[in-house]
Image (spheres, helix red, strand yellow):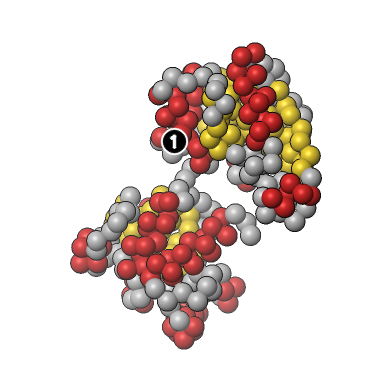
């Protein structure tokens, strides 16, 4: 649903009456994952998708009825093999879609505030005609309707794994809204310029670290990193949250900078470490890291040469290959 938040804000500003349809279960080759959402206005206009085109027509028709009745409903769809081929799948599947009037104003206001502040949370909805909503923040604070505390372990697990799902009770759906993933850019270069633009396009928070003021401050960015540290990595990284939501890209080409970053990143919980350089350059990097005391297992966690091999030559092509590899890791592939 994150991908259509800006559209929701626009429609709300216009005062339109809306319904929201969310994928809550999938089987086999469903075209869209659980959590995907479609916004429908009272005149049948839609934003987003729940199936890539297979069932949108039926969902929109039901949503217009639900806007009038203000009664939510769970719809079940089977997708035929022929329809699956239409949206690029090899075989059909099935999905459940929860269609409901748009969230109450107080709930949406709270969600919108949390999204603006980039504070992770989950939205718990009851799957009934008149849904009840609870918002649970990453720090455990809750707002909205009360719910059984026995559901908390499943909510925490869903948040940790980043997976929206129907809970084991079968009567609640949890939608996960994680914090933005963070891309750490070590070194400002032409590739960094292109990669920063792509990272913003795909919803990453970007942090640039480069002690070379000329590179960090004078490089002309199309989209600037959100935070720029003109400092050494060892001065900045100890103060950052280097967790599984963080993706580190080493780009400076200067071992004095790159190695200092790697010494800290290899001991952290970051989800991804990629380092620019040829195989020969990386072999020398590996030797240095082993001399610093890092194990073969630790060193092997570095993605180098960086990026998916697409025969990249231009900086923008290299940036694309890196972004693809980061997204692949983020999506658990």
Using the rendered view, name the quadrant where residue 98 is placed: top right
Residue 4 vs residue 92, the one in the foreground: 92
Q: Is residue 219 above or below residue 290?
A: above
Residue 131 vs residue 94, the one in the foreground: 94
In percent of width and height, residue 310 lies at 52, 73
Q: Is residue 54 above or below residue 46?
A: below
Residue 320 at least partly seen: yes
Residue 291 at least partly seen: no
Using the rendered view, name the quadrant where residue 67 is placed: top right
Q: Which residue is drawn at 49% across and 24% down?
A: 108
Mark 1: which secondary structure? helix
Q: Which residue is drawn at 52% across and 62% down?
A: 324
Residue 295 vs residue 209, the one in the foreground: 209
In percent of width and height, residue 223 lies at 32, 53
Q: Is residue 19 left or right of residue 29?
A: left
In percent of width and height, residue 275 lies at 45, 71
Identify the image quadrant of the C terminus.
bottom right
Using the rendered view, name the quadrant where residue 144 is placed: top right
Q: Name the residue under label 1.
A: 6
Identify the image quadrant of the N terminus.
top right
Q: How many marks?
A: 1
Q: Which residue is drawn at 46% across and 86% down?
A: 280
In percent of width and height, residue 293 lies at 50, 76
Q: Is residue 110 above or below residue 34?
A: above
Badge 1 local density, few (<14 within 10 Å), some, or many (20+)? few
Q: Residue at x 60, y 54 (%)?
A: 331
């Amino acid at each position: 649903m994150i991908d259509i938040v800006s559209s929701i804000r626009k429609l709300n500003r216009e005062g339109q009456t809306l319904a929201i349809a969310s994928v809550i279960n999938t089987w086999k080759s469903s075209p869209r994952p659980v959590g995907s959402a479609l916004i429908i206005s009272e005149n049948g206009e839609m934003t987003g998708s729940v199936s890539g085109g297979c069932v949108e027509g039926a969902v929109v028709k039901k949503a217009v009825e639900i806007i009038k009745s203000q009664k939510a409903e769970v719809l079940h769809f089977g997708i035929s093999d022929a329809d699956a081929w239409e949206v690029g799948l090899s075989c059909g599947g099935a999905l459940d879609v929860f269609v409901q009037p748009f969230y109450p104003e107080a709930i949406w206001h709270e969600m919108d505030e949390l999204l603006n502040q980039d504070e992770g949370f989950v939205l718990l909805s009851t799957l009934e005609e008149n849904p009840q909503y609870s918002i649970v923040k990453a720090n455990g604070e809750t707002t909205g309707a009360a719910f059984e505390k026995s559901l908390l372990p499943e909510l925490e697990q869903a948040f940790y794994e980043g997976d929206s799902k129907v809970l084991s009770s079968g009567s609640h759906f949890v939608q996960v809204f994680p914090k933005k993933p963070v891309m750490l850019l070590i070194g400002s270069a032409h590739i960094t310029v292109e990669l920063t633009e792509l990272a913003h396009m795909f919803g990453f928070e970007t942090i640039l670290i480069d002690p070379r003021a000329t590179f960090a401050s004078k490089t002309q960015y199309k989209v600037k990193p959100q935070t720029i540290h003109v400092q050494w990595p060892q001065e900045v990284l100890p103060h950052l949250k280097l967790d599984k939501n963080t993706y580190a890209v080493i780009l400076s080409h200067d071992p004095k900078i790159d190695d200092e970053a790697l010494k800290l990143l290899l001991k952290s919980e970051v989800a991804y470490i990629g380092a620019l350089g040829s195989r020969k350059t990386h072999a020398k990097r590996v030797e240095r890291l082993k001399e610093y005391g890092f194990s073969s297992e630790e060193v092997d966690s570095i993605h180098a040469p960086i990026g998916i091999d697409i025969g990249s030559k231009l900086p923008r092509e290299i940036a694309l290959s890196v972004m693809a590899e980061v997204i692949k890791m983020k999506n658990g592939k």
